[in-house]
Image (cartoon, rainbow, N blue to C red):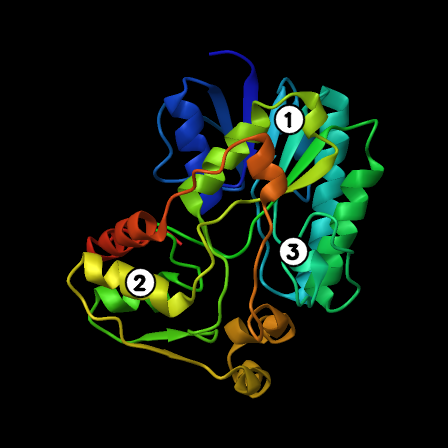
Amino acid sequence: MGEAIVVFGYGPVGRATVERLVAEGRNVTVAQRRRPNDLAAVVRFVGCDVLDGAQVAGAVAGASEIVVAIGFAYDGAVWRRSWPAAMANLLHACEAAGARMVFLDNLYMYGPQDHPLTEATPLTTIGAKPAVRADLTRQWMAAAGRVRVAALRAPDFYGPGVGLSHLGDVGFGAIARGRRAVLISPPDMPHDFAYVPDIGRAVVTLLEAPDDAYGQAWHMPCAPTTTPRRILETGARAIGATARVSAVPLWALPALGLAVPSLRGMVEMRFQWDRPYRVDASKFTARFWADVTPFEVGAAQTAQAFRDGVGRG
């Protein structure tokens, strides 16, 4: 089965990555606190808390590469406390094992921008969560020469079974149940979305890339920019449904966040939704591939999965 790969986190992207690696016959281990109920029998599992350095070192020992696809509660204080410690543990473990790391990142570290985001966009100091992501970038970059890290930065994503998404349970899920989609974002603002199976493919692409692809960030390619409403309408048509879409006004988020904890973490991220949000992935597409899944396919498959009751989180 070849060299060992450890995937930290079995959320939507971790799952998509593992499925692709298993299909290629790779030697895969999943590491997280609890064993996933749907983990394939051919995939090894190791219990691991990424905030425990000894457990992380034990999980990485003997691996040639790791994938970091973990997440923490959507709270600035939790991020400030947990993310730097987790990254330090992962970097130390990779250094000891001589393993390369593919880090699934987001695009928060750029803060508010009025132009397409590139890998050269300066890091921000605005907001708790964006500042944490910027500091994580500095953290893994400072380890260059000791640890080989490639960061895959993806925008908001969607896909079959992806419930916790701007287009997930509140979008495709609601439409599949014959209800109105109520988004926490303006439905007619142009915004890039990445398809989860494509992200898994991009992670594996970086795992298979030579060392010169490491020590840098790569932006995830997406289908041509469109609006959440159009994506939902495309999926609705595929299942013979009507896309009724409304949204929580951005100006109301601060007040709503006082009463609804799940909205509280969204307040400082309004800059992602109050203007067009476009990602320049030309660096990745010039080096690797550009044939991402079109919304006509991805939205249809996602809507069909929600209609059929496939929802994982």
- Inter-mark Cα distance, 2 to 3: 27 Å
Position in image of residue 224 (x %, y %) = 45, 54
Frontmost residue, 209 versus 98: 209
Identify residue type, mark 3.
Leu
Residue 188 in sight from this viewpoint: yes
Determine whether label 3 and label 1 are within 8 Å by CB: no
Image-based side of 35 in relation to 280, left or right: left
Q: Which residue is mark 3?
A: 117
Q: Badge 3 local density, few (<14 within 10 Å), some, or many (20+)?
A: some
Which label number is shown at residue 202? Answer: none
Residue 169 image position (x, y, % from top left): 35, 63
| Pair 1/2: label in front | 2
Q: Which one is in front, 225 or 252?
A: 225
Q: Which residue is mark 1?
A: 60
Name the N-terminal-most of marks 3 and 1: 1
Real-space CA distance between mark 1 and mark 2, rounded to the nearest whole angstrom: 37 Å
The one nearer the camera, 110 or 131, is: 110
Q: For residue 15, what is the image quadrant? A: top left
Q: Which residue is mark 2?
A: 172
Q: Please give left or right for residue 240 compared with residue 50 in the image.
A: left
Q: Is disc 1 surrounded by few (<14), some (14 to 19) or many (20+) residues within 10 Å? A: many
Determine the secondary structure under disc 2. Answer: helix
Q: Does residue 43 appear in this view?
A: no
How crowded pointer 2 is (Cα within 10 Å; few <14, some 14-19, many 20+) is rated as: many
Judged from this view, the residue extending furthest toward the left is: 240
Q: Is residue 123 left or right of residue 297?
A: right
Instruction: Say which residue appears at 77% left-offset and 40% top-offset.
Output: 140
> In which quadrant is the C terminus drawn?
bottom left
